[in-house]
Image: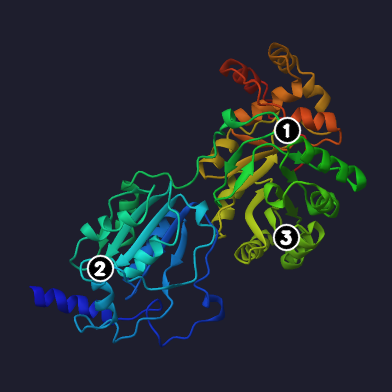
């Protein structure tokens, strides 16, 4: 039996794949390790020799929509290195407790991942020492590690438990062995059995951590954090726009929304660069528009980057559905891979549109920005998006031009405001936040901007939330 097992393991180690082989030259894009897409809070890191581990990793990716990262040895393994029980490189590494084979490349933004699937083949009943290198290269505090191995007979057993001492502060789940030819359904059942929620819960915010002048953040499915209250800049132009953005930043606002069609990206970039707020503390959303920009999305993306001139764009949206919208989004996906944009989203997309759209793209939208206010609440759309792990953001949170006065004067809202000693505008913003909707009210008045970011000193009761919910008229105030 031992000879048969040794022969099987030898055959496994002799078969070379991209990660181990020396015969295939690296393409320019993999010179520093394989490229990574920026999706979700799940990382699937794997070292594969025969392609079996890679196959299971790809099946986990298909199930979780996570990010694949291939652990590539800096010095590729040759056929002689992998000749089992020959005294070759792999044999020596597995026998040497201090062996730590170097890795080519690294995981970008490791801190954004909450769950790490860790895959490897079994060598001498243990994980290859390059897995030890990987684990010792990052801080896994607060993360959940789910190991998996590929082998025809050896279980994961001590190969996983022996890795625990290499990291501290992480939660380890029981791993599983997969043989070659494992089906997608088998992997799906295993992932389901873990009982983990891989998509961040975006339906409720940590409002207790907020304070006036400092909005909490929500974790997007891209892994980045976005403030839940910001400044909308529609209709703000020129020096008025610059002054408004500066007033917002001075008041503690850290989320700024703009768009190509607003004609103010340049002024917003200038205001940010001239402020004393570090760039990395500010979350900027912009949008490209149907027509010429969807037809030539690469140029549209570059135009936004050039006008804003703030290094990168935190989030780019498609302004509304239109011809070539999938083409435009795919160009935005490429910009994410290139580090020009961090997160992607959509504006004015609803249930039917979202289902059709996400089937055609690779990166799940992190946000949908729609018209939402007490007279048009989207009571079906909001939970639908939340269930997809998509944050919902309200433009026209006060009902929009020509309707704001009526909404702010609504007797139900005024009554609630008086009960809390706040303004009607603050009640409406608090209502948005308590139902898990990000709000971006627009204003050029510094006092109003400060008022809008000061909604964390009170909370609405469930009865008050229900009273506002009863105001829904399904009354849309714009054509999108």
Mark-to-mark CA distance, 2 and 1: 56 Å
N-term mark: 2 or 1: 2
Q: Which of 419 and 140 is in front in this view?
A: 140
Q: Do the residues labelled 2 and 3 touch (CB within 8 Å)?
A: no
295 up-or-down from 258: above or below? below
Please give the label number shown on residue 122. Answer: 2
260 up-or-down from 71: above or below? above
Question: Mark 3 falls on what kind of element?
Answer: loop
Q: Do the residues labelled 2 and 1 touch (CB within 8 Å)?
A: no
Please give the label number shown on residue 311. Answer: 3
Residue assigned mark 1: 397
Q: Can residue 363 be seen in this view?
A: yes
* Residue 399: quarter of image: top right
At x 26%, y 55%, the residue is: 161
Question: Mark 2 falls on what kind of element?
Answer: loop
Q: Residues within 10 Å of mark 3 (few under 14, many from 20)?
A: some
At x 43%, y 49%, the residue is: 141
């Amino acid at each position: 039996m031992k000879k048969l097992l040794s022969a099987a393991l030898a055959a496994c180690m002799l078969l070379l794949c991209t990660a181990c082989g020396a015969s295939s030259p690296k393409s320019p894009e993999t010179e520093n390790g394989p490229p990574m897409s920026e999706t979700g809070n799940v990382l699937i890191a794997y070292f594969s020799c025969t392609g079996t581990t890679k196959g299971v990793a790809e099946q986990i990716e298909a199930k979780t929509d996570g990010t694949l990262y291939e652990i590539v040895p800096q010095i590729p393994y040759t056929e002689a290195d992998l000749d089992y029980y020959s005294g070759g490189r792999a044999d020596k590494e597995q026998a040497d407790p201090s062996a730590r084979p170097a890795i080519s490349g690294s995981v970008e933004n490791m801190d954004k991942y909450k769950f790490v699937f860790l895959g490897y083949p079994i060598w001498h009943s243990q994980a290859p020492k390059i897995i030890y290198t990987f684990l010792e290269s990052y801080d896994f505090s607060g993360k959940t590690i789910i190991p998996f191995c590929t082998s025809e007979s050896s279980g994961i057993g001590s190969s996983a438990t022996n890795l625990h001492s290499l990291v501290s502060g992480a939660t380890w789940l029981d791993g599983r062995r997969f043989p070659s030819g494992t089906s997608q359904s088998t992997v799906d059942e295993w992932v389901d059995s873990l009982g983990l929620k891989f998509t961040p819960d975006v339906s409720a915010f940590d409002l207790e951590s907020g304070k006036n002048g400092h909005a909490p953040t929500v974790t997007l499915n891209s892994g980045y954090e976005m403030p839940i209250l910001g400044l909308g800049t529609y209709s703000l132009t020129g020096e008025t726009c610059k002054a408004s953005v500066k007033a917002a930043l001075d008041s503690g606002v850290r989320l700024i929304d703009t768009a190509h069609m607003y004609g103010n990206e340049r002024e917003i970039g200038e205001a940010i660069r001239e402020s004393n707020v570090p760039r990395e503390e500010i979350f900027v959303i912009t949008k490209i528009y149907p027509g010429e920009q969807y037809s030539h999305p690469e140029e549209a993306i570059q135009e936004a980057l050039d006008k804003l001139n703030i290094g990168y764009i935190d989030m780019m949206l498609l302004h509304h559905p239109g011809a070539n919208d999938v083409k435009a989004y795919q160009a935005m996906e490429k910009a994410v891979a290139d580090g020009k944009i961090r997160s992607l989203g959509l504006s004015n997309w609803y249930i039917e549109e979202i289902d059709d759209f996400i089937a055609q793209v690779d990166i799940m939208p992190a946000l949908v920005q729609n018209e939402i206010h007490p007279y048009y609440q989207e009571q079906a759309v909001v939970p639908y998006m939340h269930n997809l792990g998509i944050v919902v953001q309200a433009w026209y949170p006060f009902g929009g031009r020509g309707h704001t006065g009526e909404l702010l004067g609504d007797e139900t809202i005024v009554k609630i405001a008086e009960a809390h000693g706040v303004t009607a505008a603050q009640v409406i913003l608090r209502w948005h936040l308590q139902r898990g909707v990000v709000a971006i009210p627009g204003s050029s008045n510094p006092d109003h901007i400060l008022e809008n970011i000061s909604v964390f000193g009170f909370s609405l009761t469930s009865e008050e939330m229900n009273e506002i919910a009863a105001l829904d008229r399904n009354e849309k105030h714009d054509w999108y």
